[in-house]
Amino acid sequence: MLALPATSGTSTRQPNRGSPVSHSNESLRIGVIGLGAMGRGSALAMHERGLDVVGCDIVEQARHAFEAEGGRSASLPSELGGCQVVVVLVVNAQQVETVLYGDQGVAKHLAPGSLIIQCATVAPAFARELGERLDAMGLSMLDAPVSGGVAKARSGDLSVMASGDKNAFDKAEPVLGAMAATVYRLGDRPGVGSSMKLVNQLLAGVHIATAAEAMALGIRLGLDPETVYEVITHSAGNSWMFENRVPHILKGDYTPLSAVDIFVKDLNLVHETGRDLAMPTPLSSSALQQFTAAKGAGFGRDDDSAVIKVYQRLGGIELPAAANDPEEV
Amino acid sequence: MLALPATSGTSTRQPNRGSPVSHSNESLRIGVIGLGAMGRGSALAMHERGLDVVGCDIVEQARHAFEAEGGRSASLPSELGGCQVVVVLVVNAQQVETVLYGDQGVAKHLAPGSLIIQCATVAPAFARELGERLDAMGLSMLDAPVSGGVAKARSGDLSVMASGDKNAFDKAEPVLGAMAATVYRLGDRPGVGSSMKLVNQLLAGVHIATAAEAMALGIRLGLDPETVYEVITHSAGNSWMFENRVPHILKGDYTPLSAVDIFVKDLNLVHETGRDLAMPTPLSSSALQQFTAAKGAGFGRDDDSAVIKVYQRLGGIELPAAANDPEEV
């Protein structure tokens, strides 16, 4: 069921790069709901590859940012009835529910056979049930959580962990080709993509909190933080997240690339899913408590590496200061 | 204070490879205490590079294994009085204490100015105090925990996280050059090396337990374990330990490369050190509980990836079976 990155990425993407729009894409109108940093990036990546895209967000500022780069926008999901493919790039299941089934939701306006590409990180059970509900309306769904961050969204280089039937994958192909460098085909029905994303978020969330715990202990032991980073990134204690997030701590720069709030949400999904399946997840729960404490202390909208401030407050360590701390200038 | 891997590795090691033994090394006798898999490997690596090495272990079988590969051995640390450098490659602080200060300990037999290279993973406070005690006897100490595993010990390619004064580093140079590919010079007194090793073990231990938790949840969600491995090792959820240990789970092969017992010990050191410093380490404590449960369930001497069997027992998942399960043959 697995398409390897190189193969899949190349084959899905190639037709959309620098070549004229093909006949089948000419008649395809795509709606992108959610023009936050991720959604705007993906919508612009599609637009630049010649796809007919309408971006949708209730926030005026988000629409203007999209329009400023050449995009066409709508303010309500219900205005996207003419689209054959709707990409949902919102934050959580509640927002997915609202944009599809709320008063101004798009679902009831779509023609039979239209495709929803669901990209939010949601509980696998929610994704599975959503697929059934859309199917009952004659709509198709690809369960397709994304990862890679804002820069890769903008360049069309996301990773997509996708599941759905062949028809859904076929219909999604030009869209995924414009959004993603790698498409994992994980199964033939919604829920599998969200399961894989949840496993990834479990690891990512615990690794960030553990990186913070390790740096905090190292600093408390009197180690030089830069040296800890240098040694650990060459040792068996390394993780993708340690390597990526600890530099934010070293620079004292907590500008959010991905926020504490995201892992409060995603590790709650891990917790709820484990509870529903009667599978204990003690490490995830412990990390969830640390992110929850970080949010409680007022750092919810800071970069997720700010979870180290929980250790700072409790353990009394001194963290590296920002080189250009605005308060000092 | 930090020597980068390439530079340091090359410069410390080069003189010992394929060239005649230099005059200064001719008169240097080295004792290696602890001929377990790591100690035997390092002692043989030194022997093959022309150093005058005596290996020491109270276990007859360990001595025979060393002698079978050409090594010379002694059964008691007190027999190593003629050595100018003694490398201590035992399991924990209690063993370090015994081989140095027990009835048959080596410390009182060494000539003033001799060097102890302490390689066990011990509490930083223990390493610091040990340095002071040895110093009071006129002996020198390098705090030098190692990492890299059995194969790298045998090939002389370990990483060493070392601290001590210049005299200790100078005297240790030919020995470290034979044992290690990378020597991190972390500080000028014992304790800093052990601090760095503890930070690494914190990360390594939590990452192994988290890899087990993630695989367990993935399997419980119905994901294919091989696919989870493939996707995660290309995603932000990856860690050195996930990449290295999950294949053991996929093969159902829990032959110990590094045992559950090691992380029960090392995460206890993290816990005790955090307690002494009043620095909470909740993620490490949670991982410690999982390794403790694995030991309690009888898997202490299995590979550390066997911590997933705790999740198996509680969550009722089916793990991949060994391809050549002896019970099935």
Image (cartoon, coloured by chain):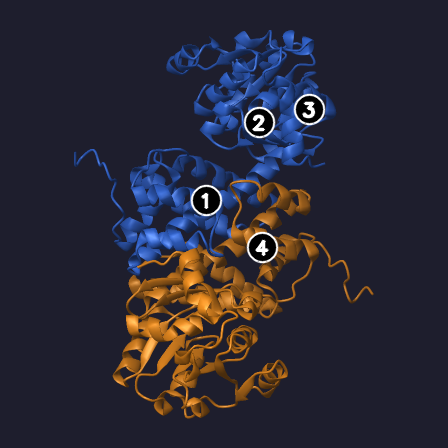
Chain colours: A blue, B orange
Say which element carries label 3: helix
| Chain designation of label 3 | A
Given residues A195 and A171, the one toward you in this image is A171
Task: Quote the CA–CA distance across marks 2 and 3.
Answer: 13 Å
Residue A180 numbered mark, or none: 2
- Residue A252: give x, y in percent of width and height: 29, 41
B134 relative to B238, above or below: below
Q: Residues within 10 Å of mark 4 (few under 14, many from 20)?
A: few
Q: Are marks 1 and 3 in contact (CB under 8 Å)?
A: no
The amino acid at mark 3 is Phe
Task: Assess whether mark 4 and mark 3 are in contact (beta carbons under 8 angstroms).
Answer: no
Describe the element under mark 2 as helix, strand or loop.
Answer: strand
- Quadrant of res B168: bottom left
Residue A241 badge: 1
Considering only vertical position in the picture, is B258 above or below A38? below
Q: Quadrant of the C terminus of chain B?
A: bottom right
The residue labelled by disc 3 is A169
Which residue lies at the image location 49% right of the left edge and 28% below the top edge?
Answer: A152
Mark 2 chain:
A
Q: From the viewer's perspective, is the residue at label 2 or at label 3 nearer?
A: 2
Residue B240 rendering spot, x and y as whole percentages: 52, 52
> What residue appears at the point 27 percent right and 80 percent down from the top-left corner?
B135
Q: Amino acid at mark 4?
A: Asn
Mark nearer the viewer, 3 or 4 = 4
State how far apart marks 1 and 3 are (Cα). Answer: 31 Å
> Which mark is first along the chain, 3 or 1?
3
Observer-nearest of A176 and A188? A176
Q: CA distance from mark 1 to mark 2?
A: 21 Å
Badge 1 amino acid: Met
